[in-house]
Amino acid sequence: MIVPTQEISLPLLKEHRVSLCVRREDTIHPMISGNKFRKLKYNLEKAKEEHYHTLITFGGAYSNHIPATAFAGKQQGFKTIGIIRGEELEFSWKTNPTLANASELGMTFKFISRDTYRKKDEPDFIDKLLETFGRSYIIPEGGTNDLAIRGCEEILAAADKEYEVVCCSVGTGGTIAGIINASAAHQQILGFTALKGEFLQKDICKFTAKRNWELCTAYHFGGYAKILPELITFINDFKKVTGIPLDPVYTGKMMYGIMDLIGKGYFEPGTKILAIHTGGLQGIRGMNQYLSKKKLPLITI
Ligand SMILES: *Cc1c(COP(=O)(O)O)cnc(C)c1O
């Protein structure tokens, strides 16, 4: 898969004499996050090899992983079931753009309470699911497992060794683990956490033995899917100037962080930076619903 790379030209970059390229994984599909595609690739191969017909996975109401699984499942002939956090959604999911989209792609839902959702990885809970839905291939929340990380190793190509720094957004840490595994020793991988995830450092260590990486935890804007007017302005300005749309949950926060670090002189002059645009654009519609309820400015589409 050839994914385009776009060089950004901005006065800030010239001033600090660094170069910034964006790997447009968001162009893999207009609605499906690029990294979710990569995470599903080897999982679906395995499910096929083992003759599964149904995929079960888990997520919140705005999860990028939910429509990605619905889409990939439909494309490859699997039935898909989404176990969704929040029983109140049973009656309102049709007005949620993420879930409505997944449903159109053939996914059926089971809505469970937040308490039950916390137990979703326990063997008893899984056994009950399999009793209800029959033999099924289970994909964890966010899609992160060993096979997902193998898929994410394909985000970096051999030619990317020219970049000294590679940046990506971090949710569960699966994507960055794949990028770290595929990186060269002279490269530094910078992860921008999209949530207050004190556990992430440890989680990522479980998936990779390399040490050429670091997490920037200063740009989560209050936590997962939390947003401030300042971030909306940044996302809209960035799109106006570069033509690149960013999502409010992951890539917007990453790019804000990259620009902030550049402005603070964090990178040595001459540094070549590659930022991975993981996608997430499907989440903009749901976020705009929320923003318009709060009478805040919207993200331009
Ligand atoms: C899920 C997601 C991430 C985070 O990926 P993890 O592997 O969970 O760290 C980053 N960007 C986008 C757009 C995503 O949808």
Image (tube, helix red, strand yellow):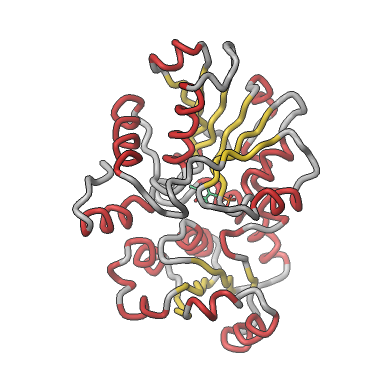
Residue shown at 57% from the left, 46% from the top = 170
Residue shown at 52% from the left, 71% from the top = 80
Quadrant housing residue 40: bottom right
In the image, is 23 to the left or to the right of 283?
A: right
| Quadrant holding the N terminus | top right
Residue shown at 48% from the left, 49% from the top = 33
Tell me where residue 179 appears, x and y as whole percent: 66, 39
* Residue reaching furthest to the right: 209
Tell me where residue 235 appears, x and y as whole percent: 34, 37
Residue 115 vs 19, above or below: the answer is: below
**Picture mark count:** 0
Residue 8 vs 122, above or below: the answer is: above
| Quadrant holding the C terminus | top left
Most foreground residue, 36 or 241 = 241
Most foreground residue, 189 or 143 = 189
Tell me where residue 291 appears, x and y as whole percent: 26, 53
Tell me where residue 156 appears, x and y as whole percent: 64, 34
Residue shown at 72% from the left, 69% from the top = 50
Residue 150 vs 5, above or below: the answer is: below
Most foreground residue, 28 or 261 = 261
In the image, is 166 to the left or to the right of 233?
A: right
